[in-house]
Image (cartoon, helix red, strand yellow):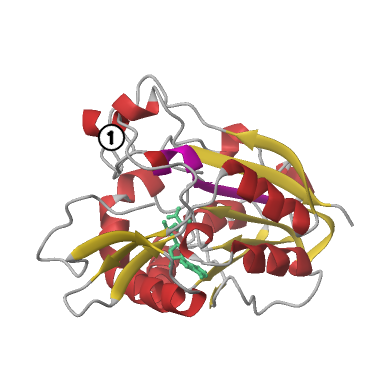
Amino acid sequence: MQPPAEPDPAGPHVPTRVARTPVDAGTTTRANRRFWDSWAEEYQAEHASDLGRDRFVWGPEGLQEDDAHLLGDLADLVGRPVVEVGAGAAQCSRWLVARGVRAVGVDLSATQLAVSTRLDQQTSTRVPVVVADAQSLPLADGVATAAFSAYGALPFVADADRVFTEVARVLAPGGRWVVAVPHPVRWCLPDDPGPDGLVVRDSYFDRRAYVERDDAGDPVYVEHHRTVGDWVRLLVEAGFVLDDVVEPEWPEDLERTWGGWSPLRGRLVPGTAIFVTHLTR
Ligand SMILES: C[S@@+](CC[C@H](N)C(=O)[O-])C[C@H]1O[C@@H](n2cnc3c(N)ncnc32)[C@H](O)[C@@H]1O
């Protein structure tokens, strides 16, 4: 999810230029590793009450796995290996580990995972974590019963197909893969929680990345857009069957904003798309 439109000028995230432009895979990954390493503490502090230490939340609408069961029956996962892709501080994995699932968190940012280790100490629930790029998972073929991602990695890679191919490789036959991303329709609208964020300004079909650059012109944050059709096509090409697309509605009683996600916009336009899939083989 894009950071707030007007970041704290004293913080590490100080873009001077914002544009929609093509960006290659290496540049994207380098920029986002630096970004998440520098922004991790601020992100975790800002969203501490939403993410908790050991809650499994799928996105800004607050949909919880405890209610949604998108990974299926939890009893079927107890004692089984499950991979969280783009885990951040691995709150979701910690929720699973506390219930007997052998969850592992993978993330590009060592600083995000350092927060995970801190949460381990605070909760006495240890989540094994690995610093790695989701485009090259350091896991053996067919080891995982399920995999999931709550806003992790997928918006931040140029080649989502590489992540899907890797996830398909590490999953056991029939394994479930559930991935939450910012809803593609949001890319038409400015990332503004207020009324200005309800005016279509960009083409939904413009696949150029959202790029923030620093004074020297180097990308410091890159996010990639795919349409709903693009996501479905990439999943099917990687060998997944699409079981559901969940678009969580904004709860009546949720009044807080999260970057561009707000009650005003959430009640009118979907903010999150969750693709629920399983491997065909
Ligand atoms: C918006 S955060 C979401 C983290 C967590 N799922 C949550 O809900 O708080 C996105 C995460 O994706 C990670 N990420 C970005 N690019 C990645 C990549 N190529 N491979 C693995 N993780 C990546 C970032 O480091 C960051 O922790």
* Magenta highlight range: 176-187
Please check the rendered image and state whether residue 178 is part of the magenta-colored stretch, yes or no. yes
Residue 74, quarter of picture: top right
Which residue in the structure is indicated by mark 1?
A: 197
Instruction: Write down the quadrant of residue 247 in the picture.
Output: top right
Q: Position of residue 156 (x, y in %)?
A: 46, 63
Q: Residue at x 65, y 80 (%)?
A: 138
| 183 drawn magenta | yes
The residue sitting at the top extreme is 252
Asked if residue 38 lies left or right of residue 23, the reply is left
Q: Is residue 38 above or below residue 241?
A: below
Whether residue 203 can be seen here: yes
Give 253 or 236, whichever is nearer the viewer.
Answer: 236
Say if 244 sits above or below 236 in the image: above
Residue 211, percent across and down? Answer: 33, 63
Quadrant (top left, top right, bottom left, bottom right) of the C terminus: bottom right
Residue 100 x/y as whole percent: 67, 55
Q: Dot 1 surroundings within 10 Å: few (below 14), some, or many (20 or more)?
A: some
